[in-house]
Amino acid sequence: MHLLQVFLQEKNVSWKNVGGLVKIRYIVCSKEGFHVSKEIDSQSVDENSKKIVRCNRGSKRVGCNAHVKLILENNNMFKIYYFEEEHNHIFVEDEDIHFLPAVRSIDYVKESFISGLFAINIGPVKAFNIMKTMYGGFGEVGASKVDCKNYRRDLNLYIGEYDAEMVVRCLIRKKECFPVFGDIVGFDDTYKANKYDLVFVPFTGIDNHFRNVTFGGALLGSETADSYRWLLRCFVNAFGNEPKVVFTDQDAAMKRAIKDELLSRHRLCMWHIWEKLKTKVGPVLSANIDFNTRMTHVVWNDTIIPEDFETEWHSIMSTFGLENHEWLKDMYDLRFDWIPAYYHGENLAGLMRTTSRCESENYFFGQICNPRCTFVEFFTHFETAMDIQRHKHRRNDHDTRYIQSKTWSDFVLEKQASEIYTKTIFKDIQIEIDAAITKCMSKSHDTVGDVQYYEIKDFKQPCTSLFKVQYNKQEDGLSISCTCKWFEQFGILCRHIFYVLQYDDITEFPRRYVHRIWMRDVVSNGSNHCNIRFDEIGRNSEIDKVLRETVVAKEYVVNRLVGDLDELCRYSDHIKSYIDKADEVMVAAPPPRRKERFADIGGNLEKSDSMIRVPIKIRTKVCGVQKRIKSNREIAIQKSSKIQKSCRVCGGKGHNSRTCKDKVSSNAIGSSNAI
């Protein structure tokens, strides 16, 4: 094998700097010199203790003297002025060259690839495995798992104390315009989302496709009422108005903050209270079918009125001897905040009854976050989540615009509804229109002045009384309402109203009863969302653009030539022919060092008095090991199934050499003898 090729495989480079200019460079073999072993002080080793065994890693250095010396000439080119060719060792096989450090590196392309995977919470080891599959084997990657892990380590070390400062800089530059569906908002805490244990609080609502949408999020240093008050003030200031309804769990600090800062209707999550019911009333009663059936009816029924709830609740308490149950008394006092009967007629009150959407969003964010990430990584993960959410919303908009929904009837309002509402909401409208035609019937019809009164029998709900519809044609449009309060709860007209509209031969959909939140054009098709990603700030966007175009072009050509092997080989040879040209360019303009590339990513970081410092770790409600407390029996079974390691000092089990009593006693004897 040629000497220079060997040097390229395994090289150590040193240089002499004269006045800021490197004039002399040495390239030596990686087996140059000898390894200096650290000797153990024999006097510090106790004769009574066992022999200390150290791991023998070996050494690759064998004193090889092969090297090259170069000197810089006036033409700014290096000239070889000394060359020692002879090696005193065998050479590495071609198949094992990738094990040598000299041929391994994380270059610009690999950095971009690994950073892209970081954004979706794929770590360096998985990133390496993906590259191994893409490149066709371990030896083709040009890097190792350790190199990938070291890249992430070095990046985090570079960020260091500038972690918070870098994120704030990005937020200042980030001017994003995105439509807000803020009538109903739910927010809940998410723990262990970053290395500082700051609490992540996303605000969750519903978009015009009845899908989850995240308005924004916050990182809080504490879970006090003051922190939540500050957060709510920032939320209102950012969006310009308060939400109509706010959903939370039974957090006392949240409740106080909402009461102090908002005029919104505060509602508690029914699911959390319902789950507690099973444990509060005891296992016997929670397994009682009659008790569960009656409680389910009185708590979850959408059509029950407050008077019926009061009667049935007290009847249940009396029947099962729960009149003096303290927890149930407390829940009864809070009935206005969680029982549907008490917000039956409130605007859009039926859209959210639990914080399940918040829980779903927390799980969604949990897939791309981890408790060890920095602020920079967390912010990148959050942006990735928002990109996913925007993509789904864009796809739903696309389906609504270009996929025509089929109508089920000849009712003219159904056709108009398909042109007004999004595809998802129109399906619900269709169900109501179909039920109006097939399941409803008018029992009576009276007219008092300009107002008409209908009593509608709904055969889909045979156990309920008649639904009363009040209908009035006015100069500014018709006015209509139903005792079922479906429109008030969900924002769409009910089957009973559609029955009356069809009965009265209405040919124009009443726009007064079209909630803007469900309209297909609530979001402009031409909306341009300025999405400045963190990993694009400071980087050369032109280089990234050319890199993406090159990859896309290469993929396009390969897909077209995959059926013609000869043409594909010619294309491969054309690509390879540019390798020599690339080497010449690299000599004239060497690529930036890793630290310089980090500076491109994070910008120029300089300490200043106004710099935002990283927070100190805080204690939250979920600090500690969040696992179920195990019984002594479970612990004993698990211990018996594990292989017990022996102590190196005494040979016993259940402890190690650091906690061994024999070692402690021997150290004490040694100390007394020394005295």
Image (cartoon, rainbow, N blue to C red):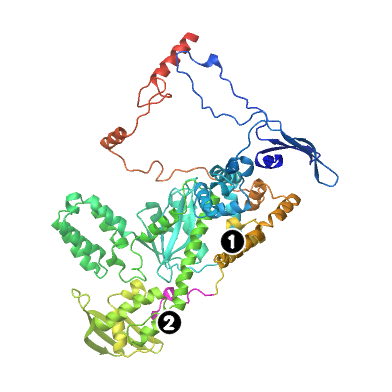
Give the residue at the far front of this rendering: 566
- Residue type at mark 2 is Glu
- Residue depicted at x 18% and y 73%: 463
Q: Nearer the viewer, residue 668 or 84?
A: 84
Residue 662 in view, yes or no: yes
Relative image position of residue 310 (x, y in whole percent): 21, 64
Left or right: where does residue 346 sit relative to residue 569? left
Q: Is residue 233 visible?
A: no
The residue segment tinted magenta is: 510-525
- Quadrant of the image for the N terminus? top right
> Where does residue 182 sit, x and y in percent of width and height?
45, 67
Q: Residue drawn 13% across and 57% down?
A: 319
Instruction: Indicate whether residue 511 is drawn in magenta.
Output: yes
Q: Pick the residue in front: 38 or 29.
A: 29
In the rendered image, residue 460, in percent from the top left (x then y), is placed at 22, 76
Q: Secondary structure at mark 1?
A: loop
| Mark 1 residue crowding within 10 angstroms, few (<14) / some (14–19) / many (20+) | some
Q: Earlier in the sequence, mark 1 or mark 2?
A: 2
> What secondary structure is marked by label 2?
helix
**Looking at the image, which is closer to me, 2 or 150?**
2
Q: CA distance from mark 1 to mark 2?
A: 34 Å
Q: Residues within 10 Å of mark 2 (few under 14, many from 20)?
A: some
In the picture, residue 269 is in which quadrant? bottom left
Q: Is residue 46 above or below residue 311?
A: above
Q: Amino acid at mark 1?
A: Ile
Relative to 166, 671 lies left or right: left
Q: Is residue 173 left or right of residue 661?
A: right
Residue 177 in which image quadrant: bottom right
> In this figure, which residue is indicated by the disc labeled 2?
419
Q: Main secondary structure of the magenta part?
A: loop
Task: State the residue position of label 1.
Answer: 532
Residue at image point 31% right, 87% down: 502
